[in-house]
Image: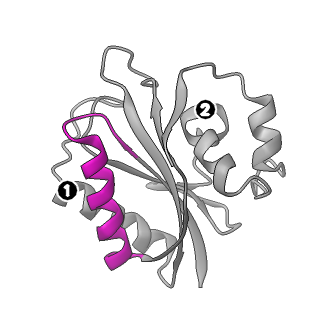
Amino acid sequence: MQEVYLLLGSNMGNREQYLHEATELLIQKVGAIKQGSSLYETAPWGVDAQPEYLNQVLALVTEHSAKDVLRSALEIEKILGRERIEKWGSRVIDIDILFYSDEVIDELDLKVPHPFFHVRRFAVEPMLEIAPDFIHPLLKKSIKSIALELSDELYVQKIKF
């Protein structure tokens, strides 16, 4: 069994409902949820002219490989109506693999740990809530340490526990 940390995000339509539906599908296709963060309302990152996001980090226990988790995440995004139009643009749902246990994967279509995790407050804050002592396998720092060093000052607010 592996522990996988996923970041869910939505900034279109009923954001909370999309996160809920994605969570239910992740349970069916990936594995049991070990822990989930609160919901966070966050400023957009990468493309400013778009609505704010709801983000959440989930820790799941899975028997699936990282590649299979990625396939399931992409399938769930498609089921829920995600269209890839603009890089970092608005979306009904986004599911990113942040960490897959302590593995480092560097393939063309899969990079784990997520290459931008440590510079994105909207990912670090919810991860900090559920796994402050988790050690980033490349940086060799705890999430708590990464949070203290974070220079990203975009808006991130816990809104629902």
Looking at the image, residue 119 sits to the left or right of residue 149; the answer is left
| Relative to 102, residue 114 above or below | above
Which residue is at a point 56% across and 41% down the rendered structure image? 123
Which residue is at a point 38% across and 20% down the rendered structure image? 47
Report the residue marked by disc 2: 121
Coloration of the structure image = one colour
Does residue 115 appear anywhere in the picture?
Answer: no
Q: Which mark is residue 56?
A: none
Q: Between marks 2 and 1, how big is the CA–CA gap?
A: 26 Å
Looking at the image, residue 103 sits to the left or right of residue 19; the answer is right
Boundaries of the magenta span: 9-30
| Relative to 116, residue 128 above or below | below
Report the residue marked by disc 1: 78
Which residue is at a point 28% across and 31% down the rendered structure image? 90
Question: Quadrant of residue 113 in the image?
Answer: bottom right
Q: Residues within 10 Å of mark 1 (few under 14, many from 20)?
A: some
Q: Are discs 2 and 1 less than 8 Å apart at CB?
A: no
Looking at the image, residue 104 sits to the left or right of residue 50; the answer is right
Residue 152 screen position, x and y as percent: 64, 22
In the image, 80 versus 111, the foreground residue is 80
Which secondary structure is most common in the magenta stretch?
helix
